[in-house]
């Protein structure tokens, strides 16, 4: 059981977007599709034709270019190995690794006084691990369905529902983290962390795909199980933190702080109603939004078409279109929604207009038009340039809209997936702490005030 609440005077910093996965949780066949070389080869041959041979010839006679290319590849391989090194740990150890990373950084962001961000010191760090429903159960829409795998892979038998194992592993991990040094043995190398209370408060979001629930009644059963008595109050979530007897059916209300939706895995935000199945799918998503709006349950949704994508390209584009969320919010204007991965880049290589520019404009329009729409910076703010460009975005907006955006941007890291783009968790946090592009007030908004308003009621 978690330690008693520190009281209303506790200053909390929030990471509103991270993942707690071990090597058994993700759908790696889906993830591997992102790294195939075939699309790159096709693009190169299409764009360069016979000129490709000339480029290869030049590379062979340009050792300096080859060395840089090798260094670039090695750096990315090292990051992938770093990610796998984290994911080979159980989830309790992963939380301990994060805390240790903050404590051992040079200089440490976390010490006996608390977490230091800019000029502020925080007593606790709130983590909201976002679970993801990797179960592909619709063979007509999901590329990596059992029927497709049966033709492609020798060992294609479907695994037991991954979301169930995720839930069990996550709540065991929270228990282990909170009890480290007391009820549970601390992993070797983390002896410095053996004096509780721990710095993290951990409030997971339930990964949900309405298509994976055959009927509206089954979806309602799930929502009743975890959110029937939902209050949205920090005290109720905190009282439940770490209370797990090993039985998933005993988790109950306040086990989860919100809901995570992931369109690239086959969740359609607003299914078309041109078929009988479409009508059923629309009914389920409308019911989900109704329940979340009435009870004030926060939803975090993956923004963009990257990540763990299992849909064919055409359907991926259709499922992830930002226009769907404009339609959803027209019907449910008070829905508490965070659309993740806010883009700020305007040009690629300083000359090519960035394709995400229309997405950014649409997100700003949603934020400024709806009182409970947020965005987060997870997996985007992996270098100092992000904050400089975010400042530029804010300064170009009318004053009223700029203030609305300031009050709806949330800090999030996308750990552990973000390790493919940045070397450590502490580095991502330090970039916020040390940037001169944001004022101290803006840093407090991103890391504390805005997330608290998004997550909690009262």
Image: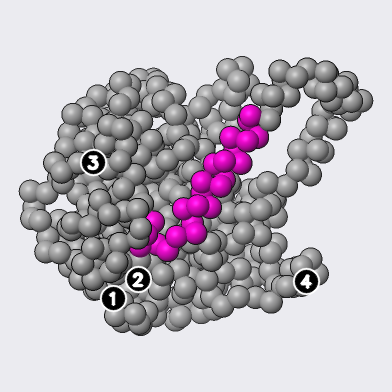
The image position of residue 331, as x and y in percent, is 41, 55
Can you tell which quarter of the image residue 145 is in? Answer: bottom right
Determine the secondary structure under disc 2: helix
Which residue is nearer to you in this view: 205 or 35?
35
Q: Name the spot of residue 395 as percent of width and height, x first.
A: 35, 20
User: What is the C-alpha distance between the residues marked 3 and 1?
Assistant: 28 Å
Q: Secondary structure at mark 1?
A: loop
Q: Identify the image quadrant of the C terminus.
A: bottom left
Image position of 406 with respect to 333: above or below:
above
Circle 4 residue = 154
The reply to whether the C-beta atoms of the residues labelled 3 and 1 are less than 8 Å apart is no
282 with respect to 277 (left or right): left
Say if mark 2 contacts mark 1, CB within 8 Å.
yes
Q: Which mark is residue 244?
A: 1
Distance Cα–Cα, label 2 vs label 1:
7 Å
Q: Is residue 92 magenta?
A: yes
Magenta stretch: give its range: 71-94
């Amino acid at each position: 059981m978690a330690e008693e609440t520190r009281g209303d005077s506790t200053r909390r910093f929030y990471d509103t977007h991270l993942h707690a996965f071990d090597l058994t949780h993700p759908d790696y066949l889906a993830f591997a599709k992102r790294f195939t070389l075939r699309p790159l080869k096709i693009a190169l041959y299409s764009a360069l034709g016979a000129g490709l041979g000339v480029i290869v010839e030049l590379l062979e006679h340009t050792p300096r270019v080859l060395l840089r290319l090798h260094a670039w590849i090695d750096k990315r391989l090292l990051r992938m190995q770093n990610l796998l090194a984290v994911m080979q740990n159980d989830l309790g150890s992963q939380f301990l690794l994060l805390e240790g990373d903050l404590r051992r950084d040079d200089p440490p962001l976390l010490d006996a006084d608390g977490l230091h961000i800019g000029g502020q010191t925080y007593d606790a760090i709130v983590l909201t691990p976002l679970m993801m429903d990797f179960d592909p159960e619709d063979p007509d829409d999901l590329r990596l369905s059992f029927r497709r795998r049966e033709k492609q892979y020798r060992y294609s038998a479907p695994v037991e529902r991954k979301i169930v194992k995720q839930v069990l592993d996550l709540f065991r991990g929270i228990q282990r983290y909170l009890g480290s040094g007391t009820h549970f043995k601390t992993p070797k190398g983390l002896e410095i962390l053996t004096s509780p209370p721990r710095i993290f408060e951990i409030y997971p979001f339930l990964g949900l795909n309405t298509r994976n629930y055959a009927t509206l009644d089954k979806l309602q059963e799930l929502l009743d199980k975890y959110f029937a008595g939902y209050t949205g109050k920090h005290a109720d979530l905190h009282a439940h933190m770490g209370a797990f007897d090993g039985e998933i059916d005993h988790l109950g209300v306040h086990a989860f702080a919100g809901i995570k939706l992931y369109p690239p895995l086959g969740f359609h935000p607003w299914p078309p109603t041109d078929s009988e199945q479409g009508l059923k799918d629309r009914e389920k998503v409308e019911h989900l939004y109704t329940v979340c709006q009435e009870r004030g349950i926060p939803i975090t949704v993956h923004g963009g078409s990257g990540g763990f994508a299992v849909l064919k390209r055409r359907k991926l584009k259709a499922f992830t279109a930002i226009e769907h969320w404009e339609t959803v919010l027209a019907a449910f204007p008070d829905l508490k929604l965070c659309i993740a991965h806010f883009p700020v880049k305007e040009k690629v290589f300083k000359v090519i207009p960035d394709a995400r520019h229309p997405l950014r404009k649409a997100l700003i329009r949603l934020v400024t038009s709806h009182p409970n729409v947020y965005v987060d910076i997870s997996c985007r703010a992996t270098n100092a340039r992000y904050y400089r460009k975010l400042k530029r975005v804010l300064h170009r907006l009318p004053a009223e809209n700029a203030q609305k955006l300031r009050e709806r941007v949330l800090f999030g890291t996308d750990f552990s997936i973000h390790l493919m783009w940045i070397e450590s968790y502490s580095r991502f946090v330090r970039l916020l702490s040390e940037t001169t592009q944001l004022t101290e007030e803006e840093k407090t908004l991103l890391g504390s005030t805005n997330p608290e308003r998004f997550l909690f009621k009262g």
